[in-house]
Image: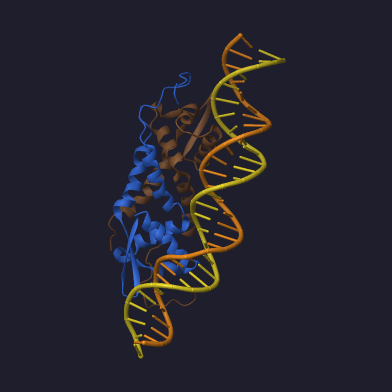
Chain colours: A blue, B brown, C yellow, D orange
Amino acid sequence: MAAPTATCCAPIAREPLAETEAAELAVLLKAVADPVRLRLLSMIGSHAGGEACVCDLTDAFDLTAPTISHHLKVLRTAGLIDCERRGTWVYYWIVPAAVARLGELFSPLAEPAAV
Amino acid sequence: MAAPTATCCAPIAREPLAETEAAELAVLLKAVADPVRLRLLSMIGSHAGGEACVCDLTDAFDLTAPTISHHLKVLRTAGLIDCERRGTWVYYWIVPAAVARLGELFSPLAEPAAV
DNA sequence: GTGCTGCTTAGACAAACTTCGAAACACGAG
DNA sequence: CTCGTGTTTCGAAGTTTGTCTAAGCAGCAC
């Protein structure tokens, strides 16, 4: 930390991800790094009208309702989806800005690394 | 499970993520859903020449060498990075195709949900 | 060959995550 | 108001993950 060894290779010229930002993005990624939540997100996103109610989502899985509710809460806490109660049912929809941030994250890394 | 209630909303017209594919993508996402691995990936990707040696990566963290090696192995197992030993040191670089797949995953969901 | 440095593997443990069952809350119907 | 349905919250098991120490393998210097 104090004195670089200077025997290996050049130090990192540009450190694109600070420790704080990495932790913040990891929370976002961890929210989608689960098969159930990934499918939930895609179901909500591909649903006609851009909204899906919990009952539809629950029926699509072999999981109990509390489990689905928990996963939805994780996605909502991460800011990836939002919800509203309309009468008996609760409807969920995607927050495009948050999802777009994930997509943009990997764009610069996907290129073949310029000098 | 057996009989759909048919009282709530329309069934999902298009289910974009099959159970198998979701599980496969979750493995990929879980590999980057960690602050340390996220920073490792960005460090390797932003390093001059597109390659980074382990000694540089280890020095940048307050973690022991085995821990860094473990995280690198997770990224390598996921196919996101590759490595080669050249003499004393081991060099890592990014596999652009694998990273690009992550970026493309969120593109259709980031749009404001067509009808 | 012997010793030193760099990196990985193996095993162990604490923390976090996923899932469940039971209970509580919200809303409409009668 | 009371009841039934839909959804969330509350604890509690079982599993996975992140980190460490100790040990092993690979290559350079002498």
Please state, as top left, top right, bottom left or bottom right, where the N terminus of chain A lies in the image: top left
| Residue A107 position within the rendered picture, expressed as x and y whole percent measured from the top left | 34, 41
The answer to whether residue A84 is above or below residue A10 is below
Work out whether residue A41 can be spotted: yes
Total numbered labels placed on residues in the image = 0
For image coordinates 34% across by 38% down, the residue present is A108
Q: Nearer the viewer, residue D28 or D19?
A: D19
Q: Nearer the viewer, residue B41 or C18?
A: C18
Please state, as top left, top right, bottom left or bottom right, where the C terminus of chain A lies in the image: top left
| Residue B111 position within the rendered picture, expressed as x and y whole percent measured from the top left | 29, 54
For image coordinates 43% across by 58% down, the residue present is A37
The answer to whether residue A64 is above or below residue C7 is below
Place residue D8 in its image quadrant. Answer: bottom left
The answer to whether residue B61 is above or below residue B28 is above
Work out whether residue B86 can be spotted: no
| Residue A23 position within the rendered picture, expressed as x and y whole percent measured from the top left | 40, 43
| Residue B67 position within the rendered picture, expressed as x and y whole percent measured from the top left | 54, 37
Q: Nearer the viewer, residue C10 or B94?
A: C10
For image coordinates 46% across by 27% down, the residue present is B56
